[in-house]
Amino acid sequence: MKNGYEAPRIFTRREFLVTASAALSSRSLLDQIPEHSIAADRHRPQYHLMPPANWMNDPNGPLYWNGRYHMFYQYSPIISNTGPKHWGHAISSDLVHWRNLGIALAPTPGGPDKNGCWTGSAVVVNGVPTLVYTGATWSAESERAERQNGFTPERQMVAVAEDPNDVNLIQWTKIPENPVLASPPPGLRASGWRDPSLWKEGDTWYMVIGSGEVGKGGMALLYRSKDIRNWAYLHPLAVAKPDPSTQDPTRPFASVWECPDFFFLDGKPVLLVARGNSYLTGSYSDHVFQQELGGQIDFGSAAYAQKTMQDDQGRRIWWAWIHEKRSAKAQIAAGWAGVMSLPKRLNLRSDGSLGVEPVRELELLRKGHKQVPSQNIEPNGPMLLKQVAGDCVEIVAEIDLGDARRAGLRVRSTAVGSEQTLIGYDSDSQTIFSDTTHSSNDPETATGSSLFPYRGVQSGSLKLDKSEPLRVRVYIDASVLETFANGRASITDRTYPTTAASLGIGLFSEGGTAHLRQMTVWELAAISPDRLTSGANLFRV
Ligand code: DQQ
């Protein structure tokens, strides 16, 4: 399995200053870049949740409460992952159509979250919606040295809904006891200590905090509380084993386990860790998790910081931050960066692995559709299908690989394929892949750091039974591509074609003939009339 995602790196002082000055020059983008130019950006998705402008990253606290879905997410008024993080807030009654409600949490000057309200969780405590999050108290340029000296710039914080009966949950109050946890357990040389995730057993709350020990690797630290304010540290819930994506026994699985998420799916304990969108399942007794099986929910490096919620139907719904794959310069010029993934439902399969599928509510987006006749897919067949095209579509297709080595769909393609993105199956390696190598002629998408690799092949294991066709469901929304395969794999990717005409959809095969059993292309509806989702004024901070 390739996951292509490196553990987040601590910036050197020089790197930080370069990034920060680029970011600062984009301050108040909401005032500098007219909304109509953001709305006119053809790379901006139309049916994904995002703020009206500026920066979005992790889903923080997805919460189902009082008949509504709430999504809190990392938001920064400047376009940079080092920007001051706020909690943006949006609400939906169907998981698909969202209304932005503005800022739920902002850093308090001089407070334990003065440098950012980082990731955490939303839970309901005695009938009161409650946010538990990490306050950042660091100054990034000196963080590396401070960490070497054992300083941990993170604090754990709590905020409560001022009026639990307000259907929109607009006002949040940080409690006076903050920080509820001021430092990691004594003796731990923590390489990070953030992103609390909570669950309840009987009348007791448990919480894991993503951490890691310098030189050893990631871990999830377990805490217990009766009231969310007073926490007792117990022990590590789980610690890193060799990286499951490389099978290299010498490589610890990430230096920090960012965004751990622990829950039970059909009674089975599951631990998610941000890196590689990984999951671990196993056993849970005496509050210790024993890892048995592992895998990835999403094989694409564009998705990160996964987080789940349970709704009133008992569904375990998965979200992730879809980050950009174009340069910081291009992001700042565009005036926005980051997209929330589509909601995906997790399920426990009979072999103990996790399956993943789009939630059925996404069908609400469907408008007209076209059917593509079944046909053979030859290696030198036509570049594009005549009947279908688009960048706001859902494609549902079933393909028999036949004797083809690789086969699948070509999307976001020009008529001659000078720009094109492939989504398909490789029979030799038994992998599902998305290939953005030729998706754009824009040099701003040509390279990328190890943290954010830009173009190339993303792939992951998908073993098809002998007579099992490849069943794909692909959501294209401008620059976002989300692919689901056979109920058990997903890949999220980005594509930024330079040509507005790169809308073509086609079929491809290599090394033999494949067969298209059936294919439907749905035109999908935008969730706001102006491509801005909603609420620009609410985000002016
Ligand atoms: N993003 C947050 C951190 C988290 C990281 C800060 C993951 O809390 O570890 O925006 O993307």
Image: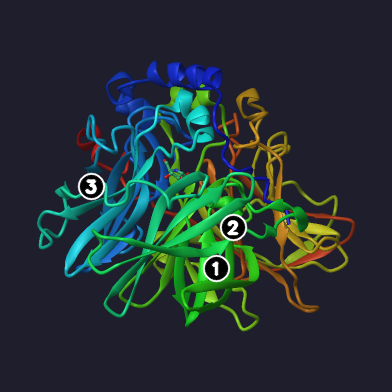
Give how far apart the Cα atoms at labels 2 and 1 are.
9 Å
Tell me if 415 is positioned left or right of 394 in this view. right
Nearest the viewer among 339 and 442 is 339
Nearest the viewer among 151 and 452 is 151
Tag on residue 178? 3
Asked whether disc 2 touches disc 1, contact meaning CB atoms under 8 Å apart, the reply is yes
- Quadrant of ligand 1: it is top left
Q: Position of residue 330 (x, y in %)?
A: 51, 24
Amino acid type indicated by mark 3 = Asn
At 64% from the left edge and 36% from the top edge, which residue is drawn? 454
At 31% from the left edge and 19% from the top edge, which residue is drawn? 32
Q: Choose mark 3 or mark 2, whichever is in front.
A: 3
Q: Position of residue 342 (x, y in %)?
A: 45, 56
Tag on residue 491? none
Nearest the viewer among 52 and 310 is 310
Tag on residue 356? 1
In the structure shown, which secondary structural element does the residue marked by tag 2 occupy? loop
